[in-house]
Image (cartoon, helix red, strand yellow):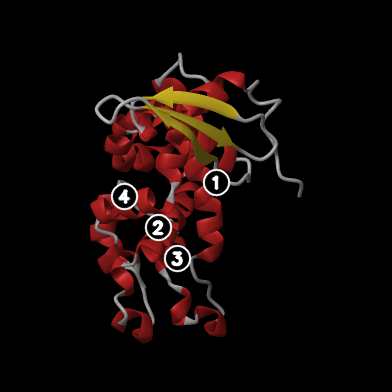
Amino acid sequence: MSGLEFSELYSLLGHEFAQPDLLEEALSHPSLDRRRQGGRDYQRLEFLGDRVLGLVISTALYRDDPDADEGGLAVRFNHLVRRDTVAEAARLLDLGPHILLGKSEERQGGRDKPAILADVCEAVIGALYLDGGLAVAEAFVLRYWAEFVANSTSAAKDPKNRLQELIQGRNGKPPRYQVLAQEGPDHAPCFTVEVNADGMQPAKGQGGSRQDAEKDAAKAMLASLDIPSKMPRKAK
């Protein structure tokens, strides 16, 4: 495939490739079976692009909120690099029509599958990095993630989200909430909830609804953590 055939995509990416073969590789789904022809699919570039995306996003968040602690940054980061967000960025880019698919995957609607969109988008980021350097890859990510970054602050404010992201980010199981008591009249109840997480001391919270009590318990557990030294890490 020649570089001229990528002219529309170059405009969307904000970069004209000196090595168009890199972009072709980034767009090539494994269903093409390019390896039989001595070529490669997007998987290696996806691996690289995932790390580049993480670096760019973590740097952007560090600069965006100088007062945020590690926990708040972690919640926003995990939200911004998860598959659904990357797939949505690919849709903003209108990347689907440019993906190179085998016939079977084409018939199965592969161009709009979130997993494929996310994988190809990360591969494209890897290709941008190799062809143009970090500045080019960073410009692309900041362009298509700008709205997601701006909206990610709300996720960091919910203590349940924050606690879950902190624990799962270290390969732990999600926190478990249990109602210990419900007191008071129906029109003004008071719930007591306990949250448990592997390797943590249980924490309790109270609220006028189960949801509020769970948030209070999560807030109590977060307050008890000495980040990062007391966060449990799964043995490798």
**Residue 51 tag number:** 1
Q: Position of residue 134 (x, y in %)?
A: 48, 39
Q: Position of residue 155 (x, y in %)?
A: 37, 33
Q: Earlier in the sequence, mark 4 or mark 2?
A: 4
Q: Position of residue 3 (x, y in %)?
A: 34, 64
Q: CA distance from mark 4 to mark 2?
A: 8 Å
Q: CA distance from mark 1 to mark 3?
A: 21 Å
Q: Residue at x 44, y 54 (%)?
A: 122
Classify 54 as above or below 65: below
Question: In the drawing, does residue 141 fall left or right of residue 169?
Answer: left
Q: CA distance from mark 4 to mark 3?
A: 23 Å
**Residue 21 tag number:** 3
Q: Which amino acid, by three-letter code, is at mark 3?
A: Asp
Looking at the image, do the residues carrying marks 1 and 2 touch, with CB atoms under 8 Å apart? Answer: no
* Label 1 Cα crowd, 10 Å radius (few <14 / some 14-19 / many 20+): some
Residue 207 seen by the camera: yes
Q: Which amino acid, by three-letter code, is at mark 4?
A: Ala
Most distant residue in the front direction:
185
Q: Which amino acid, by three-letter code, is at mark 2?
A: Ala
**Residue 89 tag number:** 4
Q: Earlier in the sequence, mark 3 or mark 2?
A: 3
- From the viewer's side, name the closer residue of 31 and 113: 113
Residue 5 seen by the camera: no
Classify 210 as above or below 235: above
Q: Which amino acid, by three-letter code, is at mark 1?
A: Arg
Q: Earlier in the sequence, mark 1 or mark 4?
A: 1
In this figure, which residue is indicated by the disc labeled 2?
118
| Front tag of 3 and 2 | 2
Looking at the image, do the residues carrying marks 4 and 3 touch, with CB atoms under 8 Å apart? Answer: no
Give the secondary structure at mark 2. Answer: helix
Task: State which quadrant residue 211 falls in.
Answer: top left
